[in-house]
Image: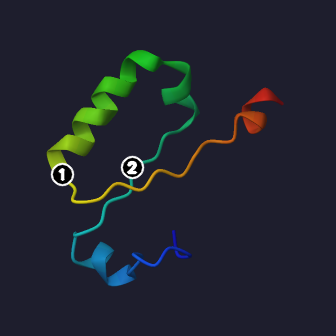
Amino acid sequence: MSGLSLYDPSLYQQNKMYEFTIDENLLERPCDILEFIENIKEVRPDRIVVDPVDPNVYAL
């Protein structure tokens, strides 16, 4: 995230920026994706940045 122009570490300290991680468990259990989305909706973000998952990492 630090390479993005919108990144400002002080926003984490002020609880104005949140990071949600899509880990392997979520990818293995698609039914949990809806709960993941609900967690994001609770924060009501102005902006969402998605760092894509590299499928080649999980193919190994």
Q: Quadrant of the C terminus?
A: top right
Query: From the viewer's perspective, is 12 left or right of 28?
Result: left
Residue sitting at x 46%, y 47%:
21
Residue sitting at x 61%, y 42%:
53
How many labels sit on residues?
2
According to the picture, the residue beneath numbered tag 2 turns out to be 20
Identify the element where label 2 is drawn: loop
Residue 53 vertical placement versus 27 (above, below): below
Residue 35, numbered circle? none
Residue 3 vertical placement versus 47 (above, below): below
Identify the element where label 1 is drawn: helix
Residue sitting at x 38%, y 22%:
32
Query: From the viewer's perspective, is 31 left or right of 4?
Result: left
Q: Residue furthest right?
A: 60
Percent coordinates x, y for residue 26 in the rendering: 48, 28
Q: Identify residue type, mark 2.
A: Phe
Percent coordinates x, y for residue 51 in the rendering: 53, 52
Percent coordinates x, y for residue 58 in the rendering: 73, 31
Crowdedness of circle 2 by 10 Å Cα count: few (<14), some, many (20+)? few
Query: From the viewer's perspective, is 53 left or right of 40?
Result: right
Residue 25 vertical placement versus 4 (above, below): above
Q: Quadrant of residue 57?
A: top right
Query: What is the C-alpha distance between the residues marked 1 and 2?
Result: 11 Å
Q: Identify residue type, mark 1.
A: Val
According to the picture, the residue beneath numbered tag 1 turns out to be 43
Q: Quadrant of residue 30?
A: top left
Of callouts 1 and 2, the N-terminal one:
2
Percent coordinates x, y for residue 5 in the rendering: 46, 79
Residue sitting at x 38%, y 57%:
19
45, 36: nearer the viewer:
45
